[in-house]
Amino acid sequence: MIKTHILGFPRMGQHRELKTALERHWRGELPAAALEAQAAALRARHWALQRDAGLDHVTVGDFALYDHVAQLIQLFGCEPARFGFTGQETALQRYFTMARGAAAHDAPCSCGSPHGDGVPALEMTKWFDTNYHYLVPEFDAATEFSLHADRLLAEVDEAIALPASPKVALLGPVSFLFLGKSKQDGFDRLALLKRLLPAYEQLLTRLAARGVTWVQLDEPILGLDLSPPWQDALRQAYARLGVVGQPLLLATYFSPLADNLDLACELPVAGLHVDAVRAPAELLPVAQRLPRDRELSVGILDGRNIWRSDLDAALATLRQVQQLRGGRLWVAPSCSLLHVPFSLRHDAAVDTELQSWLAGAVEKLDELRVLKRALWGDEAGVSRELAEARVARATRISSRRVRNAAVAARLRALPADADQRRSPFPSRQAAQRQRLRLPTFPTTTIGSFPQTPEIRAARAAFKRGELSEVVYRDAMHREIELAVRKQEALGLDVLVHGEAERNDMVEYFGEQLAGFAFTANGWVQSYGSRCVKPPVLFGDVSRPKAMTVDWTVFAQSLTPKPMKGMLTGPITILQWSFVRDDQPRADTALQIALAIRDEVADLEAAGIAVIQIDEPAIREGLPLRRAAWSDYLAWATRAFRVAASPVRDDTQIHTHMCYSEFNDILPDIAAMDADVITIETSRSDMELLRGFGDFRYPNEIGPGVYDIHSPRVPDTAEMLRLLKKAAEVIPPALLWVNPDCGLKTRGWVETEAALARMVAAARELRREE
Ligand code: GLN
Ligand code: ZN
């Protein structure tokens, strides 16, 4: 018996209908009932697609108006007390308040809630190693759980009415607790498991009574390095839930099971789903180890990427598993399809050849249909589809658009020391001081300046072909000049051109590099109603011509102060794109690095003395399993160094990273060997910097002295206090003064006010030293 299913489907809709509806609702233009109706229509459409592709079950419970983890907070009745809900709000109002926070308003408030000062939203954090962000549940000793299943049960009924056979998919109890946060010092949220399990049990009983034949519980933490208490928690949880009588499919994805493999196979559930894309080597061991009376669901299609599958290879693997398991098998994508676009087959911006290489969620459903028929023994019935997939793959792998002999030759000939600067940091520092003649505590910014409506309009008009190149360039030159004059007036030491010509730090480079394509509609949910459209990196990367030199040289011509050239680093470009699966990510990163390296060399040759290569994504590229870290960090930091190293000693290389946990990778950040690193630290009250100090980070460092995410302008004293705190842990001679991140989302008024105070703080510190 062969079954097919998916772990989840994108929620936004073919044309991002959910985004539109949500944003209208939040603006007060769409009543709650109409929003719910739209959502129901989307679910029905998506289930129909699943059913019509021959899936044995449609997946229910993966849908969410904002986030699937926040959904569980309401399902299990554990809304944090700090929101101060009075019971007068509707569930939907409470849901959006948790997701988005409540603005401050004068009491007494018509909504009846005591939040005159406003309430911050739940924290948002990245869903494992994806670019999806979930809302973090908050737990403390007082947290209680109770079942509120009306919404979920209504969705089950909708699916049954379609008609379709629903499989309910939810996050499992142990991952739910794991992904939440203890909001009380010393409180171990695992202690809540005993309270949470009865709510899950109750839910499973009610779902079984409703006619649900399968419940998929996701425990993706099985792919993480778990401590024994968390492993025990999984044992306890499933010892109880496994006997409720509702068949459970335990799902893991994103990462190898490794030392949790036996545990995953032993848990007393009716079935196990494994990710055979991220952990192909574990598939056969699992197939052998998992007791014969269990179902095995094989995640064989890549749920994280957009390539059309190699169906022949998939069939060969699945047949092997079939043989081991006596013919029984479930076939699925590796993880929820939340992480791929709705469809790519008819994308208006993609040529037909490239389209034929791609598979969005809808196309992956069709791949499941084909695999099932072939495994049922009707290979002849799908021979056309199999042949098409074969041709598409063969064409892609060998296409001249994909393979560029010059790039391959350059990689082969790359000298071993291509990732090394000419001299160690102390000599470079001396040479740079000689050339740049900066004061102590030099001031700078991270790159972008406010992107005003005029800038956006000019860029959009140019893109649509309504603005000639000459007119557009003049408009951008005016913006650059404005930014330069303002920076000079503010008294900043190292200036930037402001990035007016860039809408996105990856797209800007991807559009100019060979090997990238852009979709018109390849949207993927990032959080809430926000979606991103990652570039498609399909081929060998090369740089046809300089990408930033003209803008930077123009900006430098306006001022005697050093102008910082601004580039995006190879790992960030890699991380924020859909990348090819026909070569290791390390090789792709190195190709991008070489293109950036050429840009660095050109900037230097054009007289630019300071060049920043942003790598905000280097930390998020870390594999989920620690055992794989060192390999990743070795090639990632090498790619950065390859990009940064063609320059003379007296050319200063900066890098920038946004807020992240740096402490466990400090040696690797140091190994990037940037002359200056600017980081986001103000929200941590400089605590983040302590690690750099303890580690004796050797190069120069600019800890952000104010938070750019908020319009609030801190005063000079506050910035000075942070700077002094920084100077306690970092030798003052190594310190730079800068904001946390780029300023493109801010307005000019607050930007100028904040930078004036920042410069004043730096001057005050120089006086005091
Ligand atoms: N140079 C970019 C900017 O200033 C950096 C953005 C980022 O770190 N995410 O906008
Ligand atoms: Zn940043």
Image: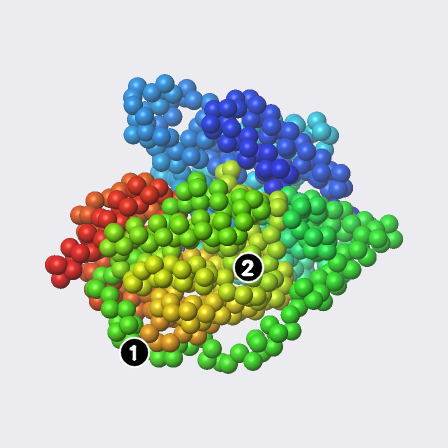
Which residue occupies 22% across, 48% down? 757
Using the image, tell me which numbered label, if any, was put on residue 131.
none
Which label sits in the foreground, 2 or 1? 2
Identify the element where label 1 is drawn: helix
Q: Amino acid at mark 2?
A: Gln
Q: CA distance from mark 2 to mark 1?
A: 35 Å
| Mark 1 residue CB less than 8 A from any atom of ligand 1 | no
Residue 1 drawn at (x, y percent): 78, 48
Q: Is residue 764 visible?
A: yes
Q: In front here: 612 or 154?
A: 612
For the C terminus, the quadrant is bottom left
- Identify residue for label 1: 427
Q: Nearer the viewer, residue 463 or 585?
A: 463
Pick whichever of labels 2 and 1 is earlier in the sequence: 1
Crowding at mark 2 (Cα within 10 Å: few <14, some 14-19, many 20+):
some
User: Which residue does the image show at 50% across and 81% down from the upper left?
Assistant: 415
Q: Which residue sits at x=57%, y=75%?
A: 411
Q: Who's the residue at 31% across and 60% down the image?
A: 559
Residue 713: horizontal and vertical position, in percent? Answer: 26, 42
Residue 417 lies, in percent from the top left, at 46, 80
Could you say which is closer to the camera, residue 239 or residue 337? 337
**Mark 2 falls on what kind of element?**
loop
Q: Count the numbered circles shown.
A: 2
From where the camera sits, is residue 674 visible?
A: no
Disc 2 to disc 1: CB gap under 8 Å = no
Residue 159: x, y in percent? 67, 31
Q: In the image as oriented, which residue stretches furthest toward the left? A: 768
Q: Residues within 10 Å of mark 1 (few under 14, many from 20)?
A: few
Residue ID for mark 2: 512
Vertically, is 61 above or below 330? above
Query: Is 649 situated above or below 356?
Result: below
